[in-house]
Image (cartoon, rainbow, N blue to C red):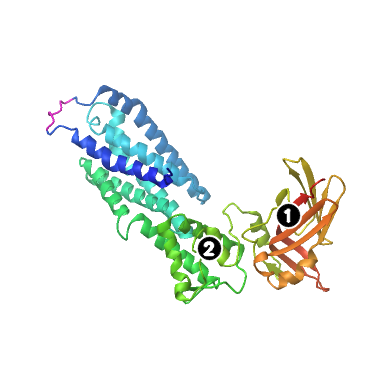
Amino acid sequence: LRVDDKFYGDVWAVSWALVFPWRLLASMPDKFDAPADDYCPKWIGFMARYVLVPLATVYLIILYAFAAKILLQWELPRGQVAYLVCFFAVVGVLTKLVIFPLAVGQNRLLRLFDRIFGVALIVPVILLAVAVWVRVEAYGITEPRYLLILLDLWLLAVVLIMVFMARRIALVSLVLAVLLVGASIGPGGAEQVSITSQLSRLSSLLAENGALVDGRLRKPAEPMSFEARKRISSIAMYMTNNPRREGALYRWSENKGGLEVPTVLTAEAFTEALGFTFVSRYDSDIIEITRAVPTEGISYSGGLPLQLDLSGYDVLVRFSLFGQDREEIWQDGPQNRRYRGTFENAEGTLTVSDLDGRRVTFDLSGLKDDLLDGGPGPKGVSLAGSSGALKVRLLVDQLNASLDEDGNMVNIHANLVLLIGQEQGD
């Protein structure tokens, strides 16, 4: 019996969001006895005085110091603000709710925290709003960012309730419930808003790079920049991670006379249909190459074939060139063989050698005709060579170079893939 992994998540959500609340409410009595004046259990008072309030106060001080640092440096740390504010929201609001019946007592710390919490929450609300706005402006809305926006709206509502309706504490939970219901259904829900936002960004990117014309998907006439390929790959990954999202990509497909999108749609298949290899968000070497693209000469970014035939090879390595001499050593783990790669910039040659002295040398100028033609179709741009038992295949992912007066490639910046192996019996 094979059970879809998503089934477990659905069961967990239904159990905790529906079955558990129903069972809990069903076990409650119809009427409650009126509480005594000191109805709050002693252990809750102890936790509030000596754990929750001190912890929330210290965390609030940290947030204010963090905000001051951002103002002084005028730089927003990447991916840190949301975590800090989310944790404070949980601890702070929980503390406020817990101490509500205790704040009328004699404890000064509890009364002070109860009185200033609403006003003190203003800075974290602004901090989170700025952080989310920066990320949405750069990358659009996704479900996590939608929930952060929701959290910020709720915290803003908490501020207003604490400042203007301090004794109507039940409104805090009511507002949260209304926001969560609104985020779950309808065109304003988290999923639909996220799909619309990402689809709009993808549409703009494709149109800017000539891949979307009159609502129809097309292979661009000119190679896309690395940054454009990376952003399209990122959105494609997001859209194809959920069946309800990926259906939106088909609207540009063959039913409108556009480029055919694969029936089994993945991010890799979508980018392959557009004529380039999927770019992971972790790919960074290519960025350095893109920044060093010569103004005149060859610029190739056709990418690698979607499927590489690795049979007969022991090692697959990426080797990046930056317009200068470079050397690397690679090791084949199972066979414990070592290989050396040497690039000589002045000659434009790349040599792969093993410890037995066998050498395979590639003159990268031999790639010029293929690169100027945009590459020989789906097989990519490649060279192959051997020396005795040593055999090497070189594939070009991206290459930029200038041309000298004789038409030779110089100042080569490239992302290469090398397949290295030994013939059987050696």
Q: Main secondary structure of the magenta part?
A: loop
* Kind of residue sitting beneath label 1: Leu
- Asked if the residue at tag 2 contacts the one at tag 1, i.e. Cβ–Cβ closer than 8 Å, the answer is no
* Kind of residue sitting beneath label 2: Phe
229 horizontally vs 264: left or right: right
- The residue most toward the front is 1
210 horizontally vs 195: left or right: right
For the N terminus, which image quadrant?
Answer: top left
- The residue carrying mark 1 is 418
Task: Please give the count of numbered marks on the rendered protein.
Answer: 2
Res. 356 image quadrant: top right
Graded by Cα atoms within 10 Å as few (under 14), some (14 to 19) or many (20 or more), the crowding at tag 2 reads many
Label 2: which secondary element = helix
Graded by Cα atoms within 10 Å as few (under 14), some (14 to 19) or many (20 or more), the crowding at tag 1 reads many
254 horizontally vs 384: left or right: left
What residue is drawn where x is 48% and y is 72%?
Answer: 254
In the rendered structure, which segment of residues is drawn in magenta? 31-37
